[in-house]
Amino acid sequence: MGDVKTARTCLITGASAGIGKEMARQIARSGATVVMVSRSRDRLASAEEEIKREVPAAKTDLLVADLSSQAEIRRLASEFISRYNRLDILINNAGVLMANRSLTDDGIETTFAVNHLGYFLLTNLLLETIKASSPARIVNVSSSAHKSATLDFEDLQNEKRYVGFFVYCESKLANVLFTYELARRLEGTGVTANCFHPGAIATELFRDQNVLVRLGTQLFLKTPARGAKTGVYLATSPEVEGVTGKYFVNKHPARSNKQSHDEAAAQRLWEISAELTGLSKPMTALPAETRRSE
């Protein structure tokens, strides 16, 4: 795809604050049309105004959707497709860290629904547009927190136990598994899929935590601008042209945890995700003999 100056359209979820807003700012600075997605139109408009003060020529568009709702995700995808005939860069960034267990309107545990199923459903709904825009890139925001996790397929929605941070870690492992499986399924299409750890970032992800945790994030964590750098690199840099199915830290490929390389687990997660999101025709996996080993 070359650098971002040749990219025509980029969609970023969770773009009203934190690293989502910073990625939008940096990508808009180089001339791409940046479609910013968040659940709050007011906060999106405020972020857009801030970006345009710094980048007067920025080309931005705003789409509102609550990514905890599958109906909203479907509406978002439909609205995007009605406005645009190509998508060069998709950045799945929106996420939550819930202190207490809750369910979405779809009856799914909220962290799993937003942090994993949101990525899965939106990507699949936009995939034909992305493939038609090849070469194109999909970038998923994960976290090094995934290294502390193991997915329990008998309790994916944490009905038996719930500890907010560890559930978040599990969702970030799901992001890596999804990225690797997506990359395998996209081989030969010209579309790459990678994920990255932005660093420990002082963002609104921690807004539902107690006051001491929130204070600590402000004192010790990276700024969103620093955290956005690897995401922008994966979305735009010629250095990663054609690179796919990797986990990055500080702009370099890094080793993800053992379960993330378990192809059977990745396929199982894909199948469960397709069922939970009602995708009647999920992508067909490549035959085992053609799949690239990790």
Image: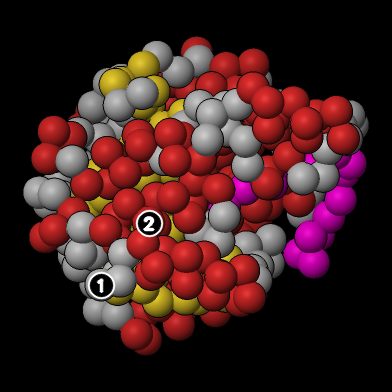
Q: Secondary structure at mark 2?
A: helix
At x 82% / y 44%, what residue is drawn?
208
At x 76% / y 64%, what residue is drawn?
106
Does residue 270 show up magenta in the picture?
no
Does residue 106 show up magenta in the picture?
yes
The crowding category of the residue bearing disc 1, from other C-alpha atoms within 10 Å (few below 14, some 14 to 19, many at least 20), is few
Q: Which dot marks residue 57?
A: 1
At x 62% / y 48%, what residue is drawn?
95
Horizontal arrangement in the rendering, residue 48 relative to residue 236 (left or right): right
Horizontal arrangement in the rendering, residue 238 relative to residue 167 (left or right): left
Horizontal arrangement in the rendering, residue 178 relative to residue 150 (left or right): left
> How many numbered marks, from 0 up?
2
User: Which amino acid type is shown beneath numbered disc 1?
Assistant: Ala
In the picture shown, does residue 96 fall above or below 201?
A: below
* Residue tagged 2: 25
**Relative image position of residue 209 (x, y in whole percent):** 83, 38
Give the distance between the C-alpha atoms of the residues marked 1 and 2, in whole angstroms: 11 Å
Q: Quadrant of residue 256?
A: top left
Near-viewer residue (50 or 70): 50
**Relative image position of residue 143 (x, y in whole percent):** 53, 29
Which region is colored magenta? 92-107
In the picture shown, does residue 198 fall above or below 74?
A: above
**Relative image position of residue 119 (x, y in whole percent):** 51, 52
**Relative image position of residue 79 (x, y in whole percent):** 45, 82
Q: Is tag 1's residue or tag 2's residue first in the polypeptide sequence? A: 2
